[in-house]
Image (cartoon, grey):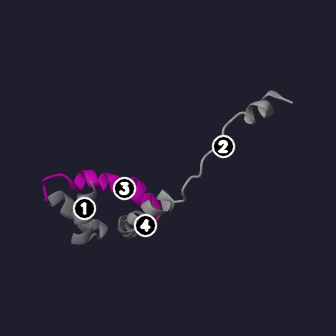
């Protein structure tokens, strides 16, 4: 017998493990609304920036969160107007930053 087989027989058996719902699926269900809103904003950005919606969310949304967190309201309003974002989108971007 090889060493691995001999060692495996000496280990104790694992006790019964209770089944539970996968945490990844639960987390995805909880974040569904946030992901949907980000994708909708990404669609609006993708039309103006000529990129995919997923790329817009990953690359542009983080910069917009930094810009919109600025206290000066004129600059975010101009940017939002040019990108076609409405007031709900602005509040969502500010909230997620």
The image quadrant where one finds the C terminus is: bottom left
Q: Are marks 2 and 1 in contact (CB under 8 Å)?
A: no
| Residue 12 x, y percent position in the rendering | 66, 38
Q: Earlier in the sequence, mark 3 or mark 1?
A: 3
| Residue 10 x, y percent position in the rendering | 72, 33
82, 2: nearer the viewer = 2
9, 35: nearer the viewer = 9
Q: Nearer the viewer, mark 3 or mark 2?
A: 2
Residue at x-position 24% and y-position 68%? 81
Please tell me in which quadrant of the rendered image residue 18 appears.
Answer: bottom right
- Residue annotated with mark 4: 29
- Residue annotated with mark 1: 79
Q: Is residue 1 magenta?
A: no
Q: Earlier in the sequence, mark 2 or mark 1?
A: 2
Q: Please give left or right for residue 18 compared with residue 2 in the image.
A: left
- Residue annotated with mark 2: 13
Q: In 3D space, how far apart are the residues under numbered discs 4 and 1 (Cα atoms)?
A: 32 Å
What SS does tag 3 mark? helix
For the question of whether residue 51 can be seen, the reply is no
For the question of whether residue 20 can be seen, the reply is yes
Residue at x-position 38% and y-position 64%? 30
Q: Residues within 10 Å of mark 1 (few under 14, many from 20)?
A: some
- Residue annotated with mark 3: 60
| Residue 42 x, y percent position in the rendering | 39, 65
The image quadrant where one finds the N terminus is: top right
Please tell me in which quadrant of the rendered image residue 39 appears.
Answer: bottom left
Residue extent of the magenta highlight: 53-73
Q: Earlier in the sequence, mark 4 or mark 2?
A: 2
Q: In 3D space, how far apart are the residues under numbered discs 4 and 3 (Cα atoms)?
A: 25 Å
User: Which secondary structure is most common in the magenta stretch?
Assistant: helix
Q: In 3D space, how far apart are the residues under numbered discs 3 and 2 (Cα atoms)?
A: 52 Å
């Amino acid at each position: 017998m090889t060493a691995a087989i001999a060692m495996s027989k000496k280990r104790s058996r694992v006790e019964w493990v209770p089944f539970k719902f996968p945490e990844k699926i639960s987390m995805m269900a909880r974040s569904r609304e946030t992901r949907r809103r980000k994708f909708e904003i990404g669609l609006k950005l993708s039309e103006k920036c000529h990129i995919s919606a997923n790329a817009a969310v990953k690359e542009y949304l983080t910069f917009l969160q930094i810009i919109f967190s600025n206290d000066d309201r004129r600059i975010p309003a101009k940017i939002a107007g040019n990108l076609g974002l409405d007031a709900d989108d602005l509040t969502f971007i500010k909230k997620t930053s």
